[in-house]
Image (tube, grey):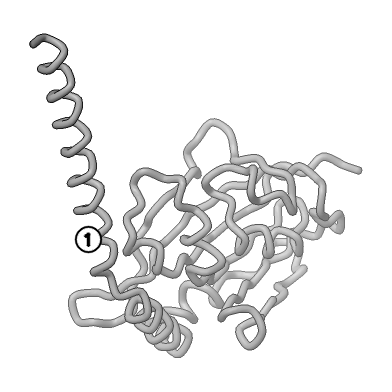
């Protein structure tokens, strides 16, 4: 009799687990991925045409030494990605294989109460004791903050350069799903990132 009770409890636990898993899967299946992708692209297109894009990405005072800025505009070739780098004057570029430390502010591109493009702060390490470190070109084993869009921009940066980056979800949020705070809907949000290379040892 005792063994029968244990067996029945085991069967009940398995049944509960299966029902829970099926419920989660059903909720996921109800999500219209194509609709989320279309909504992201439509919002991103409106963002690029908006004054918010000019104010948040393009309008920043030139660096103190007058080095100016470089635009890496790959919208036509790499999933609407673009970046504007403000030069510090250093010439040692963060090439593949080098360890880099960087500070960041990540904003989610969404809409405001009027349906217009808006940016909402998502993650930041500006006040952290240390920057985030990773090896350029090795995104898969890096920290949560490093996605393919960040890596693509940093390869064009030098020490103390800052960069403002528009990162569509295919190059950003969809590759950063280690975070427990992410939902399925977050996977299809564009990230607008402000980053600065604060650590780059000399070759």
Residue sticking out furthest to the right: 203
**Within the image, what quadrant is residue 195 found in?**
bottom right
Residue 101 at what x, y percent from top left? 67, 43
- As helix, strand or loop, the secondary structure at mark 1 comes to helix
Q: Which of 184 and 25 is in front in this view?
A: 25
Quarter holding the N terminus is top left
Instruction: Name the side, left or right, on which 197 lies relative to 92.
Output: left
**Within the image, what quadrant is residue 72 found in?**
bottom right
**Within the image, what quadrant is residue 158 found in?**
bottom right
Q: Is residue 82 above or below residue 159?
A: below
Q: Nearer the viewer, residue 87 or 157?
A: 157
Q: Which of 199 and 182 is in front in this view?
A: 182
Q: Is residue 65 above or below residue 100?
A: below
| Residue holding disc 1 | 27
- Mark 1 surroundings: few (<14), some (14-19) or many (≥20) residues within 10 A: few
Quarter holding the C terminus is top right
Residue 71 at what x, y percent from top left? 68, 77
Residue 85 at what x, y percent from top left? 67, 68
Count of all numbered marks drawn on residues in the image: 1
Residue 159 at what x, y percent from top left? 75, 51
Q: Which of 101 and 172 is in front in this view?
A: 172
Instruction: Name the side, left or right, on which 142 lies relative to 16.
Output: right
Residue ID at (32%, 72%): 110
Q: Is residue 128 above or below residue 195?
A: above
Residue ID at (18%, 75%): 113
Residue ID at (71%, 52%): 160
Residue ID at (14%, 31%): 12
Instruction: Name the side, left or right, on which 88 lies relative to 52.
Output: right
């Amino acid at each position: 009799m005792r063994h029968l009770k244990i067996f029945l409890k085991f069967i009940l636990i398995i049944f509960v687990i299966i029902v829970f898993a099926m419920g989660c899967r059903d909720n996921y299946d109800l999500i219209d991925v194509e609709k989320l992708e279309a909504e992201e692209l439509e919002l991103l297109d409106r963002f690029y045409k908006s004054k918010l894009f000019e104010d948040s990405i393009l309008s920043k005072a030139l660096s103190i030494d007058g080095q100016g800025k470089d635009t890496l505009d790959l919208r036509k070739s790499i999933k609407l990605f673009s970046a504007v780098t403000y030069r510090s004057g250093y010439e040692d570029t963060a090439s593949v294989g080098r360890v880099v430390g960087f500070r960041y502010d990540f904003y989610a591109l969404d809409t405001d109460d009027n349906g217009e493009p808006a940016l909402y702060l998502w993650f930041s390490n500006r006040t952290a004791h240390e920057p985030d470190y990773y090896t350029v070109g090795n995104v898969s084993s890096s920290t949560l903050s490093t996605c393919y869009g960040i890596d693509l921009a940093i390869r064009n940066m030098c020490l103390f350069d800052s960069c403002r980056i528009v990162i569509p979800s295919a190059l950003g949020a969809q590759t950063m799903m280690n975070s427990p705070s992410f939902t399925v809907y977050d996977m299809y949000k564009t990230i607008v990132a402000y980053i600065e290379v604060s650590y780059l040892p000399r070759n």
